[in-house]
Image: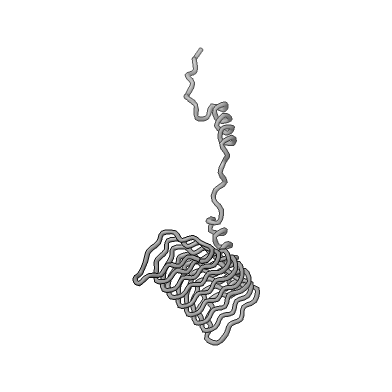
Amino acid sequence: MITTSSKGPSLAAVVRGEEVQVSSAVVGVARAGSLSIKNGGAVALVAKDSAQFANGYSQYVLAGESVHLKNAGAGALIAGGEMTVSASGGVALVAGNGVTMERSGAGAVVTGKAEVQGSYVGVVVSGKTTLGEGAKVLFGTREAIVCGVVCALLLRLLGLGRGKKRQSSAESKASAAKSKDAGIGSRPVARLKR
C-alpha cells in the first residue's frame, strides 16, 4: 500500500501501486488496483478495481469495477460496473451497470441503469432511467436518439454530412493519361499548311 500524506500539501508526477491512498496532494497520474484520493487532485486516475474520490478534482477517472465520487468533480468518469456520484459533478459519466446520482450534475450519462435524485443532467442514455424528486433531465434516451437522427439528416441535406468523393491516386493518374491522349492539357501543336 502506498500512502501520500504529509503535514502540508504534496505533489507527485506518477503514483503506482496495488493499493494507493492519496491525501492532501496533487498527482499527475495515479495507477493502482484500488485507489482512494481525499482532498486532492489528479490529471488521471486509473484503477483496476475501484476508485474513490472525495473533495477534489480529476480530469479523467477510469476504473474496472466501481467509481465513488463525493464532493468532487471530474471531466470524464468511466467505470466497468457501478458508479455513485454524491454532491459532485462530471462532464461525461459512463458506467457498465448503473449510475446513482444524488445532488449532483452531469453533462451526459451513459449506462445500463440510471437513478437520478435531486440532480441536473443534460443527456441520459440508459436502458432504464429512474428520476427521483428534484431531478432534471434535458434529453432522455428517446430524445437523444431523435435529436441525433434529425441532426444527421440536416447535415446530409446541407451537404455537410459527407465530403466530396475523392479520387484515388490510381484513378487520378488514369484520368490524367486519358486527357493527355485526347490532347487536353498538352501543348498546342503547330500545323503545317500545304
Total numbered labels placed on residues in the image = 0
Image coords of residue 111 (percent x, y): 60, 71
Q: Could you say which is closer to the camera, residue 61 or residue 119?
A: 61
Q: Residue 27's quadrant in the figure?
A: bottom left
Q: Residue at x 57, y 78 (%)?
A: 100
Which residue ends up furthest to the right in the rendered image?
127
Which residue ends up furthest to the left in the rendered image?
8
Q: Could you say which is closer to the camera, residue 82 or residue 176?
A: 82
Q: Residue 137's quadrant in the figure?
A: bottom right
Which residue ends up furthest to the top in the rendered image?
194
Q: Residue at x 44, y 73 (%)?
A: 38
Q: Could you say which is closer to the camera, residue 45 or residue 2?
A: 2
Q: Is residue 25 visible?
A: yes
Image coords of residue 80 (percent x, y): 60, 67
Image coords of residue 75 (percent x, y): 47, 67
Image coords of residue 54 (percent x, y): 46, 75
Q: Residue at x 47, y 19 (%)?
A: 190
Q: Look at the image and name its color scheme.
A: one colour
Residue 181 position (above or below residue 68): above
Q: Is residue 142 visible?
A: no
Residue 15 position (above or below residue 7): above
Which residue ends up furthest to the front in the rendered image?
1
